[in-house]
Image (tube, grey):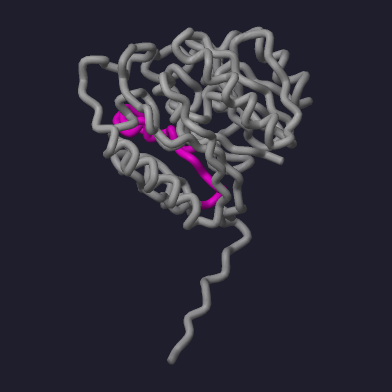
């Protein structure tokens, strides 16, 4: 029997590293209010299908060798499946979220209790921030979105808590109401993004910092293709974002398509469902 050895990874190729994620099963998922342009309360939601799609996403992470912990869903909080919005974790320190909309406000307490019970130091914010929805870690820098949800005054809090440079970026298209719908962090030095989602000043900032960024097409962004999760090599993204998947493949990344079409009805994709714990 002939054995086939894995192909060596070239020094210039993207390299995966194990990640630690927190997710929340969508047992109570529904669209009963509208706080972003994707949400249409009259549109039916197939919860059973949403759970199956979410489970496929969770299994994808496990199959890729990542750790996935689960936070218990709370009845009456249908958006809790979008776990990335509940906190930001850097160097083992948890900065809790403070939600702009009252419909989601109780989620913050659930995340605070979860991380406190797990022994993490937890910091309560003064100003509105919506976790990794608007705070994306790229290497030693935190990209910080504002314009629709997170209060710009929260950026100084983020810098003080994590002792990292924070780069404010203004979002201007309501369809991309969180930073993680317009930027995907691919590794510690590379992003994919949609320039039109940002103000001219923010576009200039991102082009200067990431001249080799992957630019997504409007069509791929419109299916939340940029709401993706990367381990440095494998990029888990919506299956409908075929053009972005091809562009990532050309750059040496391995796209891993998943179908989260039911959860898209609430305005979320893979990244919204995935909070990274950086210890």
Quarter of image, res 175: top left
| Front residue of 67 and 147 | 67
Q: Residue at x 56, y 52 (%)?
A: 66
Q: In the image, residue 51 lies at what x, y percent?
A: 34, 39
- Is there any visible trace of residue 243 in the rendered image? no
Residue 89 percent coordinates (x, y): 66, 32
Position of residue 119 relative to residue 131, above or below, is below
205 is higher (above) or lower (below) than 55:
above
Q: Magenta part of the protein: which range?
A: 212-233
Q: Residue at x 44, y 30 (%)?
A: 81
- 192 lies left or right of 261: right
Horizontally, residue 30 falls left or right of residue 161, namely left
Residue at 26% across, 15% down: 41
Residue 271: x and y, percent? 47, 35
- Is residue 69 toward the left or the right of residue 52 in the image? right
Q: Report whether residue 48 is seen.
A: yes
Residue furthest to the bottom: 1
Nearer to the camera, 212 or 72: 72
Dominant SS type (magenta): loop
Q: Quadrant of the C terminus?
A: top right
Confirm whether the magenta stretch covers residue 228.
Answer: yes
The residue under the point 41% across, 19% down is 76
Say which quadrant the N terminus sits in: bottom left
Q: Where in the figure is residue 13, as x and y percent of width and height?
A: 56, 56
Which of 71/230 is in front? 71
Q: Residue furthest front?
A: 75
In the figure, 112 relative to 189: above or below? above
């Amino acid at each position: 029997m002939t054995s086939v050895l894995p192909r060596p990874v070239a020094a210039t190729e993207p390299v995966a590293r194990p990640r630690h994620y927190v997710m929340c099963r969508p047992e109570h998922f529904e669209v009963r209010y509208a706080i972003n342009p994707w949400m249409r309360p009259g549109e039916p939601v197939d919860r059973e299908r949403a759970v199956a799609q979410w489970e496929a996403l969770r299994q994808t992470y496990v199959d890729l060798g990542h750790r996935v912990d689960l936070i218990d869903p709370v009845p009456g909080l249908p958006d809790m499946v979008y776990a990335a919005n509940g906190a930001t974790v850097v160097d083992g320190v948890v900065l809790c979220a403070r939600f702009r909309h009252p419909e989601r406000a109780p989620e913050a307490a659930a995340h605070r209790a979860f991380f406190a019970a797990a022994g993490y130091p937890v910091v309560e914010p003064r100003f509105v921030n919506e976790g990794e929805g608007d705070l994306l870690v790229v290497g030693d820098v935190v990209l910080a979105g504002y314009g629709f949800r997170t209060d710009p005054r929260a950026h100084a809090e983020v810098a003080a808590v994590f002792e990292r440079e924070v780069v404010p970026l203004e979002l201007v298209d309501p369809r991309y109401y969180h930073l993680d719908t317009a930027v995907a962090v691919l590794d510690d030095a590379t992003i994919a993004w949609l320039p039109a989602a940002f103000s001219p000043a923010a576009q200039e900032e991102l082009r200067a910092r990431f001249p080799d960024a992957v630019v997504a097409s409007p069509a791929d962004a419109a299916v939340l293709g940029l709401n993706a999760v990367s381990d440095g090599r494998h990029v888990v993204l919506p299956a409908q974002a075929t053009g972005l998947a091809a562009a990532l493949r050309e750059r040496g990344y391995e796209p891993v398509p998943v179908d989260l079409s039911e959860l898209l009805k609430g305005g979320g994709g893979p990244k919204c469902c995935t909070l990274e714990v950086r210890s």
